[in-house]
Amino acid sequence: MEERIEHSEIDLVYMWVDGNDPLWIAKKQQVTGMVSDQSEENNRGRYINNDELRYSLRSAELNVPWIRKIFIVTDNQSPDWLVRDHPKIEVVDHTEILPPEALPCFNSSVIEYFIHRIPGLGECFLLANDDIFFNKPLKPSFFFDSNGLPYVRLKRKLLGRWHYTVKKLFRKRLGQYISKVLEGATMVHHQFGKFYSGVPHHNVDAYRRDDYRYAAEHVFSDRVKASQGNHVRKYGDLHRSAFSYYLLATDKAHLRYVNRRESMRLNVHKQHFMERLMCYNPPLFCLNDSQRVSDADREAIKPFLELLFPRKSSFEKTNDE
């Protein structure tokens, strides 16, 4: 079937923060009372800048050159190496899309509620964090069907919907992230009668702007309003995977269950990045920092990414070192 999505119609949105910036650090400390801790929700790995965005953009220019526009959502920041006047690049400040009561915001879940408000965002877009990479040349049909419906990629869990019920028997409380995912799946089950036991693949996700807006402003509006004032992540925040479950339940998206050969997460604390990546060689991978990662672990990130994506992109200043 002939592909009806034009290359010029798909945008790419990055969430980015430079947690090494002294001004940002001072702001976060003033609002939250601390810069970071070793918790799941507020560890240093949530915010530290390992220069991943530079290499993610290199991977995007190399492997998805058909992207129309790239939007980088930040908190009054911009990489010093970025060509700000590049025709494909738009830096979007939180103040342009978030309501006043959400500012300043250090909670990625809350920021994601308002992605659809980005000025000039196209109808079809990809949403990514800066630690996500395009590992192979991909076509628009990898993310959207010929009618513009997105593919939702989920990972199967052992025992399906009972996987985390069993886990609860062995621990007092599930982690914050998976708790939010399960709450969203349960909400969709209650409202639309369908339960999805697969969990997010932790990588690039595809959406249609108007459907995303409707999910945020209508389907889940109460939960969005209830947590938009949470400046850092908290239990009870709505995770955007609920939007994807809603799209699946209402036939506005297609479900794809994926494994490491299609979408892979490399945990920084486990090292041996290249060996593990080449074992599966997926089209997409994520280099995940977390509370388990030490500064010594992080020293391996840049050499690995430089080896994978050595060629500068047109988004980088020519005199940058």
Image (cartoon, rainbow, N blue to C red):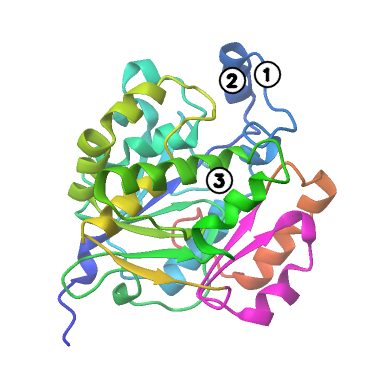
Q: Is residue 240 left or right of residue 26?
A: left
Question: Furthest residue to the right?
Answer: 296
Q: What is the C-alpha distance between the residues marked 3 and 1? A: 24 Å
Question: Residue 34 got which mark?
Answer: 1
Neighbour tally class for label 3: few under 14, some 14-19, many 20 plus, Cα within 10 Å: some
SS of the residue under disc 2:
helix
Q: Is residue 240 visible?
A: no
| In magenta stretch: residue 295 | no
Mark 3 or mark 2: whose residue is earlier in sequence: 2
Q: Which quarter of the image is occupied by the N terminus? A: bottom left
Mark 1 or mark 2: whose residue is earlier in sequence: 2
Question: Residue 28 got which mark?
Answer: 2
Residue 259 place in picture, x, y as percent: 54, 73
Q: Which one is closest to the eye, mark 3 or mark 1?
A: 3
Which segment did they paint magenta?
Answer: 260-288
Q: Residue visible at 68% across and 18% down?
A: 34
- Which residue type carries mark 2? Lys
- Which residue type carries mark 1? Met
Residue 232 place in picture, x, y as percent: 54, 26
| Rendering quarter of residue 175 | top right
107 vs 195: above or below: above
Give yes or no for contact between labels 1 and 2 (Cβ–Cβ under 8 Å): yes
| Residue identifier under label 3 | 178
- Which residue type carries mark 3? Ile
| In magenta stretch: residue 262 | yes
243 vs 173: above or below: below
Q: Residue visible at 42% across and 65% down?
A: 153
Q: Which one is closest to the eye, mark 3 or mark 2?
A: 3
Q: What is the C-alpha distance between the residues marked 1 and 2? A: 7 Å
SS of the residue under disc 1:
loop
Give yes or no for contact between labels 3 and 1 (Cβ–Cβ under 8 Å): no
Mark 3 or mark 1: whose residue is earlier in sequence: 1
